[in-house]
Amino acid sequence: MIRPRPLYRELQPMFLLILPALFAGCGGGSGAASPPVTTPAPSIVAFSATPASIPEGDTTTLTWQVTGAASVQLSDANIAVPFTGTSVVVTPQATTSYTLTASSSGGSAQATFTVTVTAPVALAGVQIDPAAPVQQIPASFLGIGHDLKDTAAIVGTSSANMNPIYEQLLKNILQYGNGPFLIRELADDNVLSYYSAADLSALSQLSSDVGAQFFVGVDFVDDDVSTASAEASLLAAGLPGNELQGLELGNEPDLYESQGDRPSGWDYSEYLSQYEQFAPALISASGGIKLAAPVWAGLSSSFMNNLDPFVASQAPTISIVTVHHYSGTACNGATEPSNYLLTEPAVDGDTQPLTGPVGISGYVSAVQRAGIPFRIGELNSINCGGQSGVSNSFSSALWAMDILFSYANAGLSGVNFFAPGDTTSVHPYTPFDFLYAENSNGTRTYSVRDINPLYYGMLLFAQAIQHGAELLPVTLTVSANVKTWATIDSSGTIRLLIIDKDQSAGGSVSIALSGYGQASVSRLLAPSYSSINGVTLGGQTFDGTPDGNPQGTVVSEALQPSAGVYTVVVPAVSAALVTIPQ
């Protein structure tokens, strides 16, 4: 028999749910329910452009001040700006209204600012003849250099603990079909620990990961053949196969006397005598690796007068002819003007010229007769550590591209930008450097310290010489501080790099080239020539990158010819790469 269930048992669950609410309504004190939390809508305090009116093709900087936003989106600029950003450089092609939207969970706010664009002025005219004689640019032309002792700070502590950010930055350059990437490792010391198996395994792993090859220094400053030979043997064992392309005998031995490392009167004849003692011993100890020599300090060195006879007599011992070059100086308290890297002397100056009877062109022919590659094994803007505000400014990116093409035009086989990695110092002229945290077992985790404008110049140069490019002569008509360089690649695509180093002149550049179709334009921009941050290449930046990949959306512009003429507007102090497929 089913017995009826008492009513209180039916109501008990409901009563237990209602009871807390009944008591919460009594007494009005500490038991009161909290009101819901409401997130306020963000506020746009300011949004403007400087300048507000520009000629077509010039740049302006949009700036804003926002509070309470989780994200910020800028319309009509093809770029998403993280909420931590406060400005962006834009190049509107016509009068444009930009809308800034600040958003949070509490809502959104918008503000609009209109940039007025006026007609451009004529800046330059370029003529390109695709059938003109070309000059090959070696695929390994663009390289880099470090101190061997900084391997763990830059590359990795071993093959099992690599710096992935460094590898990504190299891969960014190599994505355009160039390489192998030839890296110089500076060393001129009797410390064998610099040649440790762990450090060399990191370099060897870099070779496996990105196809890098190396030329590496051994001790010459101590004038001890046995020490240098021991180091050469370690290098050959740690960098097998074709990873080791050359052994450098010391570093800038033409300066040994001034540095107190050789007695008074040290000259070329004494250098040559010692070189002839060391070279065969090093080649033997390394199993046949020849030397990257003579590693002299620069074109202004008196030793350079002997480069021709040195190469002619020592060619059987040399794999790469290397000398060094710095455009300016910060030694002994010297300084260069803030705009120095925009000037022609920084590329082709009086003291270290690229052309002329005593310039690099005068030396190339001697090296070419011997059939040996000729590299600027150490290159950068300003020696003795660089000059802050100049070496790490946007002007260094424009300088880098111009001097790279100037060296290619002179017939050199490559250059190596010097990039020291000592984390205890700041290096304004390095393209990038890193920090690291080390755990108890010695494993390091790397992070970006700086990616300087110089790296952007290297990257755009790599784009301009991609896929087996050859240097194509151009005819330039211009009165402003503008340079142009053209290449043609294996598919017939022409790329014209326009470098406007003029601080005030921007405008339209007409490019005469018939028989080609639609082109595209990628721009290298910054707020000013002295900018250290805020640089963009094709709309992307490395500001804030955690891993060496560019941030932001790629931006390029379509360019149609009219009667065989392309017209592109270039802002002052900027660069543009015009890509014209066949």
Image (spheres, helix red, strand yellow):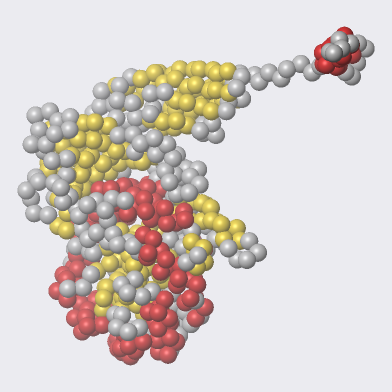
Q: Quadrant of residue 576?
A: top left
Q: Is 542 in front, or is 441? A: 441
Residue lying at the far front in this picture: please name it.
Answer: 1
Q: Position of residue 509 (x, y in %)?
A: 20, 35
Q: How many marks?
A: 0
Q: Where, quadrant-wise, is the N terminus in this rendering? A: top right
Q: Is 170 in front, or is 87? A: 170
Residue at 51 percent across and 63 percent down: it is 161
Q: Where, quadrant-wise, is the C terminus in this rendering? A: top left
Q: Position of residue 235 (x, y in %)?
A: 40, 78
Vertical relation: 390 (above or below) 412: above
Residue lying at the far right in this picture: please name it.
Answer: 27
Left or right: 369 as drawn, with respect to 321 = left
Q: Position of residue 257 (x, y in %)?
A: 41, 81
Residue at 26 percent across and 36 percent down: it is 521
Whether residue 15 is visible, yes or no, is: no
Residue at 34 percent across and 30 percent down: it is 91
Left or right: 59 as drawn, with respect to 195 = left
Q: Quadrant of residue 258?
A: bottom left
Vertical relation: 10 (above or below) 354: above
Whether residue 548 is visible, yes or no, is: yes
Residue at 58 percent across and 63 percent down: it is 443
Q: Quadrant of residue 105?
A: top right
Q: Position of residue 359 (x, y in %)?
A: 23, 65
